[in-house]
Amino acid sequence: MPGFLKEFLNRNGTGMGLAILGLVLFWTIGLIILPQLSMLDFSFRPNLPPPEIGGPKDVYTLENYRYLVFGPEGGSQDYNTVDLRVFFRTLVAAVCVTIFNLILCYPIAYYLGQTKGNHIRIFAIMLIIPYWINEILRAFALRIIFGETGVLNTMLVGMGVWDTPFDFIRNDIALYAGLGYAYILLMIFPMYNVIESLDKNQIEAARDLGAPWWRIHWRVVIPYAKPGISSGCTMVFMLSAGALAAPQILGGPSSLWFTQLIYQQFNDNNDWPQGAAYAIVLLVTCILFVLAVMRLFKVNMGDIGK
Amino acid sequence: MNNSFLRISIWVYLAIFFAYLLGPLVIMSVTAFNSSGFPRMSPWECLTFQWFGELFQDQRILNGIKNSLIIGAGTVVLSVAMGLAGALLLTQIWPKLRATYYTIIIAPILIPGVVLGISTLVFWDRINRMLGLGADSFLSNGIFLTVIGQSTFIASYCMLVLVARLQRYDIALTEAALDLGATHAQAFRKIMLPFMRPAIASAAVLAFLASFENYNTTTFTFGEYPTLTIELAQKVRYGITPAISALAFIIVALTVFFALLNEAKLKRQELVAAARKQATVEELAGKIRLPSFFAGNMAAVLLVMFAVATITVVGTATAYNPAQCIADVREQKQLEAETRIQKLRQLREERRKQREAEEAEQGDVQSTPKPSNNSGFGNVFAPNALDGDDGDGASDAENPPSNNGGSGGVFDPNSLQGDQ
């Protein structure tokens, strides 16, 4: 390693090389690795007032994780059903949002990637503009639409589809629509990048050989676009499982998102170690889930983010 | 036949998709001009600009914008610097370490923002304690924590943008500069940076936008310096007003404006390059006739149209006074409420008569109820007419929340009893 270091400093000059190394080390170790480790360590500690930290009571404990599974000590139930249900509901809903987005965006990505012309650039601008608008405002826009006296209800009641306004917010439809809406671009762009590089001759060859359109997609386009699809799906899944703004604004009063539980532990209960434990559980579960799905579909980690 | 069907279905799909994508923004922008106290499009009451005035008088929003700008500037500097260093190291790192290194610096994009916020908060709190500093030290300052927390993942975005350009950089250029006696710092400043400038500019814009709209990380780290996004979230969660729509309209308008401006500039560069390519030698020697700004540049045309529309709107806003209209609407609402009260009173009267009739029937079988309530409305409640409480609930639900002044006497249960 010192040899590598010396060569690196030689190539970039000592001053520049040290500056690069310093910044990268600060970023990777100071901002990425150590905070995560610190949070992991924190999640194994009891919730103590500041003077007692480092004192005799400050020992490692599994209490915070036990709480997630079994609930408070001496509670009436065997398991912490409330929190566990929220947790699984979050994961299932995030999967559903991802699949919905994939189905919605694949035709668009294919169309944009395979068509040439001036209008494609206009479409690209139209795609990017919503992404530049604040996340909160996007959720707010959907709340105006899905509210009890919102545009959609007024329209549907006016058309006579329903007699009374349908509560989209309480039924979580607004939440799913909002999550899907928030991450459309993250699904389209990786797929678009890959599909754009697909040689049109491959599609034409398949067509000449008599393949129907669905088989062209199934056997030619989708296998080729797999890295793009998987990175899009990974990003949408991770971000919607970790979303906080959309559930807070669009979620019904009774249905919580797991990140909201974490938020409550930090801000309302003031129980940081408990919140850190929940965050660790969320992070680890999401990563394991993504890795398992990627193995199932035989995708490499290195393809993500390209 | 089959082909045209396919084409039509593609366009229909595109229309639906973009309606889903842009519709909410359009509707939100329109609600900013409706005088209704709750952001809604229908019923349309009056065209008004009062919400913009209210927005600019909101001290919390203005303060939030100030904090957002400070934090955004800090984040841009830190994350572009770290992203550039990360990208430079990525192109030179020992191949065996490369995959690990790449995974580490790309991971913050995938880690949920909530987790990043918590880990930043917990880690710096611990450092703060280890150094024996108080709760008001620099390290637990909201601005510092937010910049650090946001830069963790925004630097990854910057790195991706920068590495794409860096891959096209010819390292021989730096080597030539070094051979000619430049120091490493000079070679970096005079050769590498000018080459990287476009990518650095787009990384900076991206970083600023990402910082400006970030919520998940900031919500844990902001401390006493709430950003605009945090203030918006508080407002949206605890009661929404069209003033938020007004802010959204401004942001949408600015975004569209800059997107069009950028597109028009790019298109113009393209057109100029094309004109240069086609120009003859004499034209190149003399002055080439550049295409005019609008020729074949749809984005530029749209840009001008957009600017004109904005100026018109602002012009109307200063001259327009919706007071008359608002007064009309209020009057109309009052009238509606009165007719509704009248109706309810009538309904009650009919119900009372019916009940009396039925009581009479119970007492004396021969007298039949009078078929007096032919309004159609009374019949709906007829089965419940005996149950007085139920009827009250239903009529209260009919009553819109706006007219709870003046009508209270009518709904007082005692008024019914008094009649009897």
Image (cartoon, rainbow, N blue to C red):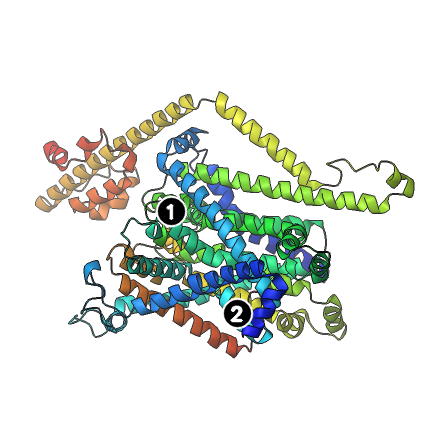
Residue marked by disc 2: B101
Nearest the viewer among A170 and B116 is B116
Q: Is residue B316 left or right of residue B348?
A: right
Which numbered tag is attached to residue B203? Answer: none
Q: Secondary structure at mark 2?
A: helix
Nearest the viewer among B349 and A37 is A37
In which quadrant is the N terminus of chain B drawn?
bottom right
Q: Is residue B265 left or right of residue A4?
A: right
The disc, 2 or 1, on the residue closer to the chain's N-terminal end is 2
Residue B308 vs A265, above or below: the answer is above
CA neighbours of label 2 inside 10 A, class few (<14), some (14 to 19), many (20+): some
Q: Is residue B327 visible?
A: yes
**Circle 2 marks a residue in which chain?**
B
Occupied quadrant, residue B44:
top left
Nearest the viewer among A51 and A174 is A51
CA neighbours of label 1 inside 10 A, class few (<14), some (14 to 19), many (20+): many
Q: Amino acid at mark 2?
A: Tyr
In which quadrant is the C terminus of chain B drawn?
top left
Q: Secondary structure at mark 1?
A: helix
**Circle 1 marks a residue in which chain?**
B
Occupied quadrant, residue A221:
bottom right
Q: CA distance from mark 2 to mark 1?
A: 33 Å
x and y percentages locating residue B169 in the rendered image = 69, 59
Occupied quadrant, residue B227:
top left
Both on one chain, marks 2 and 1? yes
- Counting labels gives 2
Going 60% across and 48% down the picture, which residue do you hit? B201
Residue B49 vs B365, above or below: the answer is above
Going 20% across and 42% down the picture, which residue do you hit? B392
Residue marked by disc 1: B230
Going 39% across and 41% down the picture, which residue do you hit? B64
Q: Amino acid at mark 1?
A: Ile
